[in-house]
Amino acid sequence: MGAAAGRMDGAGGDRNGFGGGSRRMLRRLRDAMARAATPRERLDEIVRIVAADMAAEVCSIYVRRSDRTLELCATEGLAPEAVGRTRLRVGEGLVGDIAATARPLALSDAQSHPKFAYRPETGEEIYQSLMGAPVLRSDRLLGVIAVQNRTRRQYSDEDIETLETFAMALAEPLGAGGLVEDSGGEAARRARPAPIDGLSLVPGLAIGRAFPHRRPVAPSRVVAEDPDAERERLEAAVRALNRRLDRLVDGAALPRAGEHAEVLDAYRMFARDRGWLDRMREAVGRGLTAEAAARRALDDARARIGRVSDPYLRERLADFEALADELTGLLAAGDGGNAAGDAAAARPEPPEDAVLVARALGPADLLAYDRERLRAVVLEEGSAAAHVSIVARALGIPTVGRASGVLSEVEPGDPMVVDGDNGRVFPRPGEEALAQFRRSLEARRAERALFAADRDKPCAMRDGARISLRLNAGLLADLPQLAATGAEGIGLYRTEIPFMVRPEIPDVEAQTDLYRRIVEGAGGRPVVFRALDAGGDKRLDALPVGAEDNPAMGWRSLRILLDRPALLRRQVRALIRASAGRELRLMFPMVSDVAEFDRARRAVEREMERAREAGSGLPSALRLGAMVEIPALLWQMDALLRRADFVSVGSNDLLQFVFAADRGSELVARRYDPLSAPFLRALRTIAAACARAGAPVSVCGEMAGRPLEALALAGLGYRSLSMAAASIGPVKRALMAADGGETAAFLEGLLASGEERPREALAAFARDRGIPA
């Protein structure tokens, strides 16, 4: 399984065992919850049991109320008068942080943590260490259970896993209202929440009704009465899971080739991962039911992967969560002991205008729903590299990820607006706002009609200056957008996705087949391939990289290819074969020194010579380019342009390196403007050097896809821009309304004047001339 499986299965089984004492404690909890008593009496007994079993001076249960606060409802160790009085907002304090992240937390010195929030009425100042776990039911937060100790106790992984198991046992009665009542009231829940900012994964605007993706409920039976019977149930469910995935994936209404197909095949491989299966079998052998074993294996994976920062590895956790859900549902459908069978977990039918809301999804989760009923997808987690994002993109479903807290804000049927273009979600908008969104949706349809009317026109400014607009792509599913948008070609084809979704490096044959489909699918339009851009936030299971303090500036991109020349040779060999009889354009990312470009060029030329000696078909022409993303190249442009056939500016990385601002950090990513004077001058330097050398230059970062920024680039002399499909229409419309010479003169005067806010000045220039930018 590669790195993902290795990290999840790295610890020995004994450390993660569920001992007889803990099984006895679970039975005591079960008995306490079943005993005839008031809810308060049951809660008081539960916290006493857990505190004693875990050798903790404090055990507290906080319950999430409908106003998004966490109320202390029971405690052993804190001041009794704090019960019912102490409240924390979700995200406030350590308990609130556990609730917000839905992940456990263990601290030996809790009071020094920046999230620590002191509540004097609790008397907790004497307790140094804290460990807590979320209580979840169907992916919905119900509360938090926490223990504390006076000493600076180092909680072990086994301690964390034990507390998570207790939280799992609490989920069913808490969720069913068997222990506490919600005092917040319906009015508080129906209060109109603020818009939720997230991350655009698939563009588009959608209006619909919330349809939360419900994960199977926490198992009501945790301790197995008959381990042999549970083992048989688990094995039957695993077989049924694999049959179900085969049917679901093979029957998907998607093209049979492309990265999404590779994603689905990889997902099937995860279901057969030996480490995951062995961990569940071990848990059953230690006395858990099959359902509890599936959740226990998932919680273990979540605890391990949740502590790493690698975005790709964290996304693989979503796949295992989805598999655990499928397995749990199949066990429930099998009625406890028979063949968990071929019956799939029952899913409620979504409404005709469903907005699917989930913390995370696997690709099979998405495929299980009727595509015609889905208007959009909203995830609390997720990234562009997530498997579900790739499949959603192939299906054309607007998707927003990292919409923190959305599951807590919506109930089934709530009206929702999803702005996939800007990564925003609007739960329960008012009637006036909803009417405005409907008008916006109609306006977008009308705007798309205007773009369609201009689709086949060349992008020429009013003075005749021609700008070539091209497509950024990374999937075979993107190729139909060439005709749909009128793009003149692919200015950037990202080759890394097939590497990211496989546990091993694709061989030459697989790469050749993919690149040939891309070239043929472009229909004679030029395609610029970017060599493998791995590392940084794009980790490969087959190419493990140690922890780096600054991965964006670490071992990535061309540096990896030069240090692992076999990777570069295989990719170049495949590109040469796929481009036989056609022009091959290949550019290298993250070039920091012309010597690096020289080495890469020599590697390509050697592969060309080998192909020539073997009598293989050769490209009709070879064009090798460099991406300008590292500021050091600004002082090497003349030397670079004596070697490179073309240059492409990667504005995203160049911007972050010019300003030393991590574009992945929410704190600084938006602080620095690409239309600031320093960055515009850097871009002018690049364009001027290319003009002197007569070398083609383009921009392929996000900057190229924004109308006002595209206007600035045209004024600086750039005549080729590459962008997402949704940006081509708006950018073309803006550029066709502008005069190239006038814009260039304005930009030159603006940079000479020392204007501190070029964006505002350029926006006023466009507004005065009726340029829709």
Image (cartoon, rainbow, N blue to C red):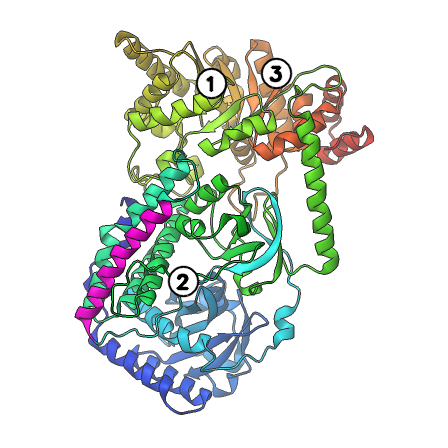
* Percent position of residue 427, x then y: 62, 59
Residue at (62%, 75%) from the top-left corner?
186
Mark 1 or 3, nearer chain start: 1
* Percent position of residue 336, x then y: 28, 70
* Percent position of residue 335, x then y: 30, 70
Residue type, mark 2 in image: Ala
**Residue identifier under label 2:** 346
Q: How far apart in space, not on screen, are marks 2 and 1 (Cα)?
A: 53 Å
Q: Nearer the viewer, mark 2 or mark 3?
A: 2
Mark number displayed over residue 625: 1
Task: Pick the residue in front: 24 or 58.
Answer: 24
Residue at (52%, 58%) from the top-left corner?
350
Q: How far apart in space, not on screen, are marks 2 and 3 (Cα)?
A: 63 Å
Task: Kindly state the secondary structure of the residue where label 1 is placed.
Answer: strand
Q: Is residue 525 above or below residue 642?
A: below
| Residue ranking furthest to the right | 768
Task: Pick the residue in front: 737 or 339.
Answer: 339
Task: Pick the residue in front: 713 or 196.
Answer: 196
The part of the image, by quadrant, that contains residue 516 is top left
Q: Nearer the viewer, mark 2 or mark 1?
A: 2
Q: How far apart in space, not on screen, are marks 1 and 3 (Cα)?
A: 17 Å
The part of the image, by quadrant, that contains residue 185 is bottom right
Task: Kindly state the secondary structure of the residue where label 2 is placed.
Answer: loop
Q: Are marks 1 and 3 in contact (CB under 8 Å)?
A: no
- Please tell me how many numbered marks the rendered image carries: 3
Apparent side of residue 39 relative to residue 442 in the rendered image (left or right): left
Q: Is residue 487 visible?
A: yes
Asked if the stretch drawn in magenta spans residue 668, the answer is no
Determine crowd level at label 1: few under 14, some 14-19, many 20+ residues with C-alpha closer than 10 A.
many
Q: Is residue 411 above or below residue 5?
A: below
Give the magenta-colored segment's residue range: 226-249
**Residue identifier under label 3:** 688
